[in-house]
Structure formats: C-alpha cells, structure tokens
Image (tube, rainbow, N blue to C red):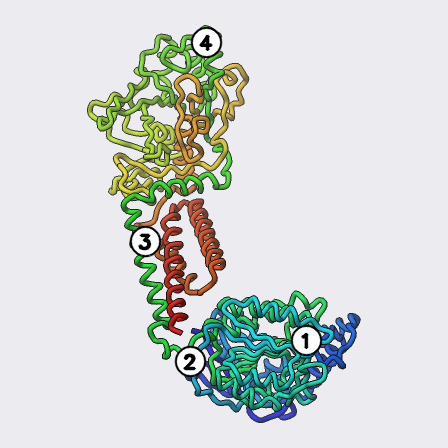
Amino acid sequence: MGKLVVLKFGEGSFEQGFAVTLQIGEEHERAATEITGRLPSFPEMPLYYSHWQSSYRQIGNRYRLHADQMQVTNVSMIQDCENTSHILRARFNTWLRAEEFRPLREKWLERLSSTEEVRVILQTENSQLQLLPWHLWDLLERYPKAEIALSSPSYDRIHKPRTPNKLVNILAIVGNSQGIDTQADLALLQQCANAKVSFLVEPQRKELTDHLWGKNWDILFFAGHSSSNKNGESGRIYLNKTDSLTIGELKYALRKAIENGLQLAIFNSCDGLGLARELADLQIPQMIVMREPVPDQVAKEFLQYFLEGFANGKSLYQAVRQGRERLQGLEDRFPCATWLPMICQNPAQIPPTWDELRYTKTEDIPNLAYSHKRRFTITLLSSLAITALVCGVRWLGLVESPEMQAFDQMMRSRPAEGLDSRLLIITIDDQDIATQRQNGESLIGASISEKSLNKLLVKLNQYQPRAIGLDIIRDFKAKDKDLINHLQKTQNLIGVCKGSDGTVNIAGTKPPPEIPKTNLGFSDFIHDHDGVMRRHLLFMNPEATSLCPARYAFSFKLADLYLRPLGIQTKFTPEGNLQMGKTIFPNLKSRTGGYQNIDVNGGQILLNYRSSKEIAQQVNLTKFLSSPVDPSAIKNRIILIGVTAKGDSPDTWTTPYGAPFYDQMPGVLVQAHMISQILSAVLDGRPLLRVWSQWAEVGWIWGWSFLGGILACRKLSFFWLALGGSIASSVLYIVCFSLLILGAWVPFVPSALSLVATLGLMSIYNAKIKHRAMSEK
C-alpha cells in the first residue's frame, strides 16, 4: 500500500508568503502525521514563470491551440527557453529550501521511504502556485515512485455507486483538428485492451450532450484545439471549425456523466488548467491536462506512453509519471516537454486502476474481488505448497539428472583460471607408443617400456622434482636391474594401484612390487549414474582381500609430498574430515546439493575442476627424453606421468567437459585436476565446492517460488508474464552461476521449477477469478 501526501496552502501571496500544512498517511486512511510551516515571500517568482512562459510560447512548435493562434516553429528560440527554464527551476528550489519551510521538508524525509509509491496532492486556490513546476522540486525527485497532482481546497465525495461496465467505456471527442494530427490519438485508444471506444468527430453541441447523458462513461477523452483565459479561471474547447464551448456550457451533461461513474477526463490539448478548474467544481474524480500549449508530437507521444502503462496495470499516477518522463527524449526539439502533463485530483476519490474501471467497489462483489492481503496470503500458501512438492520430488531423486546437467553446463561456462605452474605432465600418447615399438622396446603389460621408464626417472631426478607420480598400472615385477633400483630408492616416487569392490565384483589391481607400500596411492575414481566424474575420493579403508593396500588417493599422496616441505601437516578432525594445514575437506553426505542418497563411503568431496583448457604444462614422452630440459620446469614441481593414448588400452573418463569418447579426459589429467584442487585450496585459498544446509536450500527454492507468485499477481498479459518469467529465470541462472564460481553449489533446477510452477498456477488462478467476475456481470 502506498502513501498519500497532502500539501495545503492557506491564504497568502508571493508578496506576503504562504502558510503550509503537510499531511502524511497511508492510502485509504486518515493522515497519521500533520505539521505546519511557512513559505516566505518571493514576489519575483511569478515573474520568473512569466519569463519562461513567454519564451516557451514564442517557439510555436505546432501547438494544439485554437487554429487561429498557431505559430510557425522558430527553432532559434529553443535556447532561450532552456535558459529561462534553468533559471526558474533554480529559483523555485531555492525558495523551497527556505528556513521556515525546513520542518516540513525534514518531516517528509523522516516519514517517507524512497522505495514507496507516493501520491502528492497540492491543494491551493492560487493559480500562480498551481502553475509552478512542482515536479522539479528536488525533494520530490528523490522519490522515483512519487507524482504530484493539483487540487482545489473545496471538494466532495461522489456517493452514488458506479454501475459497472464489462469493458472500459471511453468517449473520445475529436474536436477541431486543423493543422494537427488527431488520428494517431484515436489509433492508440483503439489498441487498449478491454476497452470500448466511442468516437465523436467534430460533433455539434447537441450530439455531444446527448452522448454524455446517454451512457455510463469511464473515461472522457478530448483531442483537438483548446485554450484557457489569461487568469486560468476557465477554458474553452473547439468542437469543430465553427463551434466552441466552455465547461460551463456543458455543466449539466458533464455533471450527469460524473454521477453515472465518469472517473477520468483526459484533455490531450493545449493550456488545460482553465478546463481543470471548471471541471473540479463538478467534483470529477481525476483529470489529466496540459499545463501550457502542447506540441502535436508531444501530445501523441504522451498518450502512447501513458496508455502503455495504465492499461497494463500501472497506477494512474505512475502511468502519468512514466508518460511524462519519457517525453525527455523529445526535448531537443520540444524543450520542457516533460513539464506539460499534469494530474488534477479530487482528494475524496481514490484513483482507480484500469482493471478497477471495469468493476464495482469491493463490497459489491465480495466473493470475487479479493484484497491485497488475501492475494498475498494465497500467493504465500501457493508458493509454500509448490516448494514442498518440488522438494519432495527432488528428495525422491527425480530431478537429479537435470540438476547434474545444469551443474555441468555451469562448470563448462566458468572463466579460465590459467595453468597450475606447480605441475608438469609427461604424457604417453599414441605416437610415443609407436616410437617405442619402432625402437624395439618391449611394451608387454604397459604403455611405457622399462628402458624408457628408467631413462625418464634418471632424467627427472637430475632436476630435483618435489614429487613424481607414476599413473601407470604396473602389477608385475620389473626385469631391468637399474629400473628396479630406481623404483625402490626414489623416495618421492608415488605409484598407483586400484582397490577392489566386492559389491560389484571388481578385483582391483596390484601395485608395482618394487615401490614401498608407504609410497602407494589408489587411483580409484567415483562416477555418477550417468558416468560423469564429479566427485573426488581422498581416502578409504581398503577391503581385507583387496590387492591394493593403499588407504589414500594417488592425488592426495602427491599433494601431501608437495606440502610437507612447507611445514603443512595432515590430520583428521574429530568429525572424521581430512585437514591439511588450516584447510578442512568436509566429507560429502548422502544428500548433498543435487545428489540424493549417494554412496558416501570413504572421504569424498566435490571435484572443483580447474577451469582451464589445459590444467598444466604438458610434454610428451618422446620429446622429453630427446630434448634439453629447462631445470626450472621440473625443480620443486609435481611431475605426473600418464597415458593419453586413445588407441591401446585408453584411460579416459567422462567429465562435465565432455561425454563422447574423443571429448573424454585422460586419467592423468583428471589426477592433475584433483592435485591442483588440493594445492589451490591449501595454498591459494581457492574455494572448495560446498553446498548449503538442506533447510537453507528449501528456503532458497521457496524464495524463487514466491517471486513467481508475485509476478503473477501483477496481472500482466501473457506476453509480459512470459517475459518476466524468462528474465527471472535468467537472473536465477546468473546468480547460481556466480555462486558456483565462488564455491557454492545452490539449487538451480528446483528453483526454476518452483518459480515457473507458481507463476503458472497463480496466473491460471487470476484468470479464473477474472473470468468469474466478468460472467457475474
């Protein structure tokens, strides 16, 4: 609910000053705050306005004045108009910052939030006060949802209830339009949804009065020429080329139209304050008029922007502000265009929305028209119900697959992080295997011959790597004595084996017999139901009959070797989580993020792949053995040796970066990602992938569900609802993606489902309520 602000000006003048009363309250309620103050004398103010008015009217710009008064546009006067407008604005705000007026200004700032929708009504009989550009008040410009209207101090409520119309009934009067284009105005009115427009083109006086008496009109619209007298006390509209009328000459017909429910009069014509003053005496609820002569193009543009907002659900005041401010794009040709549209308000009446013009008061249809409170309650309950449904479906694992696909897409989309300079990968590709065979080297049971492996270890040890990881299965004894010696005595060499799993009849593989048990790590990977690797197994308890005695992962053993010289020790927390230095690697639970009821035996964490096209510097075996080596490329690094060949016994795995065979990642590169994850978390503070608690995730999902309900309550058209839902879903994806980069995996798919489901459900509900209301009529 918005706020209503009333500024009441007592008797006074610019020579004597004005007494001012400020009232602030909620819409539909009595004012809760009232304070009095004063604006000091400022006899020059009317002169400043007169100077601006004179320079503005000299421009001409094809105004919608009476045809005889039209001028030819003189663009040379535009700069003078802009200069006088700046002076008027500056002097006006200086006056409103007077010390005597400060208590009202401070009370305004104290009681009103800049995020609230505010209707401001200026009550005064002084025509010079009404003319001032109140929309330029620097205080009012702080409130983007505030708009000001003029009012007479004397007013009455219209007590006769309106007879509802199924459509918004608009009487559109096209008066004398000599020299201007009113057809655009008519076309815009015809495009309004849920409206019935009756046109009177250059009518005779009797024809106009008969129409005003004959129907229950909601909106009276006039386009054509009009003018006000010099003191602004009365105005005149030009019906056709020979006839013109004052409001007084239509008094009885207009009074009858107002009694029958006329809510809004729009005079899209020039100099409308005189018309507004006379209509206010008839207690018309709302009017929109133009302060000064209005250029034809400005009048058409304002009507278009106003109707776009009003007919699509904006309040009357917000629609006028939107239409007025959008005229700024024309001010290079039509200076001060944003000054022209004004609202004149009967304070006893509440401005209706477009939809409310088609309904009776709430008490007339108590079963159909529900209050904001009830609408909020229904939205809240619907969003909670849909959240419970989505979370239940998620708990059963029915959205696990799309959640994993969305996770993979986000992983692939992350910005590149660059190579990890602590690693060097020596790869054995198809060409390396072919080269060894051409050299007569035996490859029985392995992808690297004993001769090449021995040569590789000798060359590596010359340059003092901190750790060497041999990611090659060697479950047989070596024959070369030199190789046996190197395998046994290279203290920083880590070998691999695979553990057994009796539940799925996996026997595992033996470790290299020559490498001590303390230098072994398992190379077991965990893949999900779709075959994709998203988890990292750090440690496990090997089965009693396992061929592989290693308790820790190959990746962990190499990272631990790298970190020890830096004084970083490894231990377990009381909760059973692995801790390296100050970094704790929390074990996954059976329900973690998008996972539902997974096997979490051992110490598992989510694998936060390093987002790079290449994880580290790579060199193939043949090139490394035959070329000179840069010592800095090896010293104090972790050297990984593994197979990337796709032909002979390939070691490739499906990752978020690709499932097809040629997009799969070699096992040695997966190991590199795992090692890099550990080192980066401990040394660089790179985030591990974590998830929120289940209750936090439920709250997150409910928040987006509730947002969908709020969007639906805006009662927009299908196009705008679809657009709003698409924008909200895009924002959700961007937020989830950004959080993933920061290390938090939050639910995207369940949140998007709840948002769309609530949006759709509430839209259907609103449509049924609307249909029932229409049928009841």
The amino acid marked with disc number 3 is Val
Residue 250 visible at all: yes
Sequence-wise first label, 4 or 2: 2
The amino acid marked with disc number 2 is His
Which residue does the numbered mark 4 point to in the structure image?
437
Which residue does the numbered mark 3 point to in the structure image?
698
For numbered disc 1, what is the local secondary structure? loop
Look at the numbered discs 4 and 1 and tell me whether their residues touch, using CB distance below 8 Å. Answer: no
Q: Residue furthest top?
A: 440
Sequence-wise first label, 4 or 3: 4
The amino acid marked with disc number 4 is Arg
Query: 10 Å neighbourhood of mark 3: few (<14), some, or many (≥20)?
Result: some
- The Cα–Cα distance between marks 1 and 2, rounded to whole angstroms, is 34 Å
Tell me the number on the disc at residue 28. Answer: 2
Q: Position of residue 442 (x, y in %)?
A: 41, 8
Q: Is residue 20 left or right of residue 698?
A: right
Sequence-wise first label, 1 or 2: 2
Query: 10 Å neighbourhood of mark 1: few (<14), some, or many (≥20)?
Result: many
For numbered disc 4, what is the local secondary structure? helix
- The Cα–Cα distance between marks 4 and 2, rounded to whole angstroms, is 91 Å
Sequence-wise first label, 1 or 3: 1
Tell me the number on the disc at residue 294. Answer: 1
Residue 104 visible at all: no
Vertical placement of 239 versus 323: above or below? below
Q: Position of residue 423 (x, y in %)?
A: 46, 29
- The Cα–Cα distance between marks 1 and 3, rounded to whole angstroms, is 55 Å
